[in-house]
Amino acid sequence: MFGQQTHDTVWGAVMALYRADMTVIASLVLLCSFCIPLFKLLCQLSVLISLKWPAIKAIGILALRCYQHLREWGMWEIYLLGILVAMVKVGDVAELSLGMGLFCFVALLLIQIWLDSLISPQQLWQEMEWESDHASD
């Protein structure tokens, strides 16, 4: 606006909230935007690895339980909706340029939706139970 330019990121927002003495909100934004989504992806990876190598099946079962509890905390869809609303609201008073971060975020969101639709938790639990039944034979 009036020739001013700013470049912001989610990490910059977390740091700005922390500097403004809003540590609780900064912590929630950090957890919901970075930590929990990363942990969800790591849980999915460990579940898939444990299906390949049954020797670490206990880790896979724990990761699957953690993943199911974390599903509602990784609010990527809500962030995307917030980005779209902000783009519409700010688009009237400022010129927006979409950076690589938005495209990577959308790609990550689509991959996560694809993974959730490809592998259902029921199939994973059945596969884990099948392996434990046949491992004792």
Image (spheres, rainbow, N blue to C red):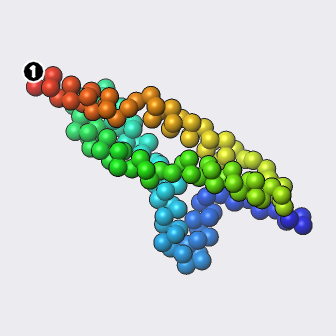
Q: Quadrant of the N terminus?
A: bottom right
The residue located at (55%, 78%) in the rendering is: 21
The residue located at (9%, 21%) in the rendering is: 137
Residue found at the very far left of the displayed protein: 137
Q: Is residue 72 left or right of residue 101?
A: left
Report x, y in % for residue 64.
31, 41
Report x, y in % for residue 26.
53, 68
Q: Nearer the viewer, residue 53 or 34?
A: 34
Report x, y in % for residue 7.
74, 59
To which residue does mark 1 refer? 137
What is the tally of numbered marks visible in this picture?
1
- Would you place residue 77 above or below residue 24 in this image? above
- Would you place residue 2 above or below residue 63 in this image? below
Kindly tell me whether residue 15 is visible in this rendering: yes
Report x, y in % for residue 83.
66, 53
Kindly tell me whether residue 53 is visible in this rendering: no
Q: Residues within 10 Å of mark 1 (few under 14, many from 20)?
A: few
- Would you place residue 16 above or below residue 80 in this image? below
Q: Is residue 41 left or right of residue 52?
A: right
Dividing the picture into quadrants, the one containing residue 108 is: top right
Dividing the picture into quadrants, the one containing residue 45 is: top left
The residue located at (63%, 50%) in the rendering is: 81
The residue located at (56%, 51%) in the rendering is: 78
Q: Nearer the viewer, residue 100 or 76?
A: 76
Q: What residue type is disc 1 on? A: Asp
Give SS at disc 1. loop
Residue found at the very far right of the displayed protein: 2
